[in-house]
Image (cartoon, helix red, strand yellow):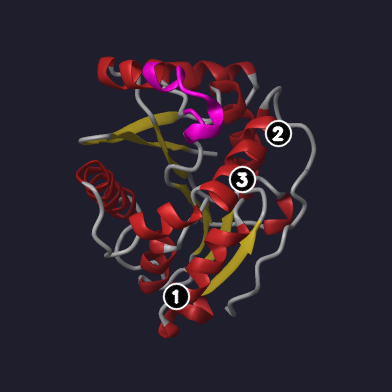
Amino acid sequence: MSVLSPRRPGLDPGPLAPGYGETRDRVEHYFDRTATRVWEQLTSDAPVSGIRATVRAGRDRMREVLLSQLGPDLSGRRILDAGCGTGALSFELAARGADVVAVDLSPELVKIAEARCPKGLARRITFTSGDMTDPALGRFDRAVAMDSMIYYSADDLAAMMGRILPRLERGLLFTAAPRTPLLMTMWRIGKLFPRSDRAPAMVPQTAAGISSALRRAKVAAPLREIDRISSGFYISTALEVAP
């Protein structure tokens, strides 16, 4: 599979849930204009501050958790990396033999991923920028959304899953910010700062809350919690929802 230049396959595939488009656009603006260089450094081997080091370590551990659910041999599998960022997970998937479609809202992050892609894996990865729920991306065996759905409400998540799941043979692995006392305190403090000075706010979730939203959206899909990673300022739960 060849590596393509970033494109936008239908950034507006239709209304998903109230507030979804606004949140999506805010996330795109942040990563494409405000935080590109910060994210490039965080996802590299460059030295970072103590706080960012805990986030980097936590993300590395979470990536391993998600990969452990997929197995070591992904030959012949077509996998959607939904919110690929700078490409680390896509590279791991391709190294295990998968054909990967790596999509992200931010064309700038996709450019970084393309530049970092090992030459031996390039034929297995198609990079593109756009909305992860776009039907034009096609059908997949599995999908993985690591830290790319953490900014949306439970109802938005359910609507997004309702768009993605019908195109999957198996489940969607994703991460969510859990409703722990520490994370809720950090979330409330963060909301005090002007929006222009901070990243889009994560929305703390519970498995029960997401399951309720799925039922409200009439998405018949069981949800299971896999593991939780807590590394300093990185606190995240891995979950899977099956079609």
Badge 2 marks a residue whose secondary structure is helix
Q: Is residue 170 left or right of residue 238?
A: right
Q: Earlier in the sequence, mark 2 or mark 1?
A: 2
Q: Is residue 191 magenta?
A: yes
What residue lies at 55% left-to-right and 39% top-to-bottom?
243
Q: Earlier in the sequence, mark 3 or mark 2?
A: 2
| Residue 205: numbered disc | none
Q: Nearer the viewer, residue 75 or 235?
A: 235
The answer to whether 94 is drawn above or below residue 194 in the figure is below
The alpha-carbon separation of the residues under discs 2 and 1 comes to 30 Å
Q: Residue furthest bottom?
A: 120
Asked if marks 3 and 2 touch (Cβ < 8 Å), the reply is: no
User: Horizontal and vertical percent for residue 59?
Assistant: 30, 48
Judging by the rendered image, the residue that carries numbered circle 2 is: 21
Magenta span: 189-201
What residue did someone put label 3 on?
A: 28
Residue 221 in percent (x, y) is at 53, 30
What residue would you read off at disc 1? 117
